[in-house]
Amino acid sequence: MHKEYERPPGVKIKDADINELHPSGLEYNAPARGMWNIVHQGMLLPEAHQIFVCSQGCLRGVILTAAEMLELDRLSWVSVSEEDMFDGTLETDIVDGVTDILERLDKRPPVVLLFLSCIHLFAGVDFENILRELSDQFPDIEFIDCYMTPTMRTTVSPIVKMSAQMYRPLNVTKKDPKAVNIIGSDRLTDPDSELVKLTESAGYTLRDIAGCKTYEEYQRMAEASLNIGYIPTCGLALEELEEKHGTPSLYLPNSFDYNTIKDNYTRLCGELGIAVPDFADNIAAAEAALGRAKEKVGDMAVAVDFTAVTRPIELMKLLCEHGFNVRYAVVDSVGEETGAFEWLKINRPDIELYSSTNVNMLYQHIKATEPVLAIGQKAAYYFATDNFVNIIMNGGLYGFSGIKKLAELISEAYDTPKDKRRLISHKGFGCASCLTN
Amino acid sequence: MKNASTIIPCYAADTSGVCSALYELGGMTVVHDASGCNSTYSTHDEPRWYDIDSMIYISALTEIDAIMGNDERIISDTVAAAADLHPHFIALCGSPMPMMTGVDFDAIAEEIQQRTGIRTFGLHTNGTRSYIEGASEAFLAIVKEYVHDCPKTEGIGVNILGATPLDIPWNTTMAGIKKWLADCGFEYVSCLGMESSLEEIKKAASAKVNLVVSYAGMAAAEYMLTEFGINFVTGLPVGEGFSEQLGENIREAAAAYEYGCVSAEGMGFDDSTGKCTAVIIGESIASKSLAGALRLDAGIDAKVICPLPADEVILSDGDMALYAEEDIKAALEEIKPELVIADPLYRYVIPKESRQIELPHFAFSGRCFGSRMPDLTKIDIKEFLK
């Protein structure tokens, strides 16, 4: 499949080790910028002000994330110098710097997301005491400990931790038996999805942080009697909300497997106390859309990447089952998708799995030898195609309607090439961007 | 007071300076870091990322490697990558975590060089300093390693030193500087930072003068003065009068022995007149060049506020080295200039009474105004001021 590499960038699925798809090593960063980071996530919390305390190199990325999304006035920073790390002032500098910033802000925010970095945790700073001191000085502000700690990513992923911290300001309140939250998503769930329709038609109010416009509105999420999550990184958030508020949670993974989707809806209906509807029409619509997409795409090679959907291997299986010529994938791990992985190993053993960061992926984009239809920005970049579905993290799509809409996006991608460079340069898919103004 | 900012950004950091300086030389640059350095650099600090492939990587440092001092991982990973990619050289540099754990980059470089047979050097960044310092060290390392004495050019050969897209707008201004050199009758030899290969850099000692266009090139210029006797001139060819004077200074520098640095006359505010009407905020050499152009083409005296490393050779008495948001804001409020020329994201600290002319600086606002960065060599100062 490849010339002899010390660390091959890809592997055929039949030869892939489910526990380690690719060898680790130095890492490359592809110019596909749609994925969200902790700044994008933090901006979802209405009226929150983010303060980052870290070195200049780390600050740069977060500040310019805010600048590009036209939210620079919601983020401040304190830089840590080399001397600060060794002169015993690491903790007092945080308190002094944050105090200085808050005193200079035109408007006092109701909540501050205070981010410390790897060096603080490594030096063993007392974050709790810092928050206590700040809370004493600013009793009208809720301070939330947040972490920009990529060095510790193998212990707790910064995205997982951030997903949980986003709901820490919620104050325990009286429950509303007819209120439900979607937790951990970075965008609203498609209102055409069965998930939203079932919940709302049963008389429930469905809330999502992505839809909250004010801090007050956000606080009403504490009233929920049920929290639903479907993004794999939402687990910690669901757990902590259950612990603090006693709100039961339901993890309904955003799957491309019809049985899993049906099982999700059965569990949901059970919690909502409603009858499980017949999904035959929904499935038929998804099947029809997949059929139309296949007819258009024909035998054109298809590539899928893990930034487009949270279950890329299941999506590959679904497409293979519907006759698509799935040839490539950019995936770094198997995660929750062992069943689909094993199915593909047996039924499509020659599918090539590529690392998103392997050093040899640097030149992958100039090697494309055949026309490719890509699902996801990284796949579009690495397989050098302008025919691609431009979504991140499922794009809000869910369930049978999600499959139908994704199939329609595949048809559209086949028909209409996109301005790849412009679209994938946009940092934080779905956020405002000064680059497009 | 700590360097705390309510709203304005910080400049690109030293790690980005290293990567930017070495980008086009065919080497492999490895930043010893967990994650953020490469995505920040490649997204916000490097406009060439999509168009020119370059072997810039991170080591993907983990907590356990940091705690256990597992240097073998970066060594073996770099050796493996080098075996696959065959770089001309390998450069290693560090982020805050390796600084805390005391990683010895020189020792790691030595080990990698022994295992690969590829020249490897360690650079001493830690993510807490500016891109000027990182780029400066990287340029100096390249010059020390690859530039050797060689016969001089017949005419006045000139190297451009310190040009990275962080300071010099990519794809526009380099062509302008080269054209200006040619129009002046100089012979372009090489450019340290953009548009020259390592092979071209190796011939840099054939030049008679170095033109330093950013303070990032100053250390390399001083080394080449000491080592090869090449005089240097600081400045960017901005505006009619200043460009003319810069050209004269290059001629003088080429003719002189033991000249050293020629700083262009009229590069800025004459404190004795006491009539500052404009303030320029930015990198020292670009800002002083613009100040010179304002004076010579429009009769405007401008002070420079430089939030980046610089020295007294470049900055004049009336100029200010200020780094913190509140200090810059206070200085502007005290000066009350009619005009402030600065990156658009400085608008938050500029007094309401002052008029701002926006001059995007990639090292400050990154991609935000990338398409609006002017080619300074082509601006007509009087038009620019309108």
Image: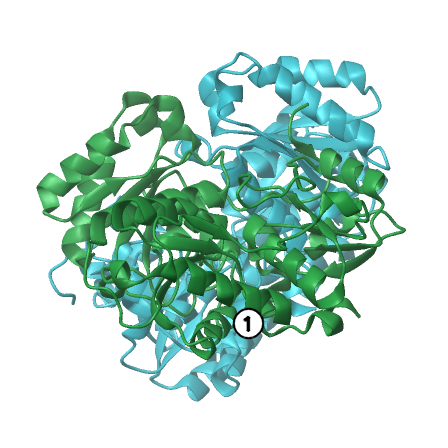
- Percent position (x, y) of residue B71? 24, 30
Q: Which residue lies furthest to the right in this view?
A: B353
| Residue plotted at (51% across, 59% down) | A33
Image-quadrant location for residue A422: bottom right
Depth order, front residue of A62/A180: A62
Q: Can residue B241 be seen in this view?
A: yes
Which residue is at 23% across, 59% downward?
Answer: B202
User: Is residue A394 positioned above or below A24 on the image?
Assistant: below
Q: What residue type is labelled 1?
A: Arg
The image's colour scheme reads by chain
**Split into 4 quadrants, where in the image is the N terminus of chain A?**
bottom left
| Quarter occupied by residue B323 | top right
Q: Where is residue A393 in the image (x, y as percent from the top left)?
A: 53, 57
- Chain identifier matching the cyan colour in the rendered picture: A
* Nearer the observer, B93 or A248: B93
A413 above or below B384?
below
Residue at the disc numbered 1: A422
Q: In which quarter of the image is the C terminus of chain A?
A: bottom right
Q: Check disc 1 and report its element: helix, strand or loop.
A: helix
Per the rendering, the colour in which chain B appears is green
Task: Please state the chain letter of the residue tagged with numbered disc 1 in the rendered image.
Answer: A
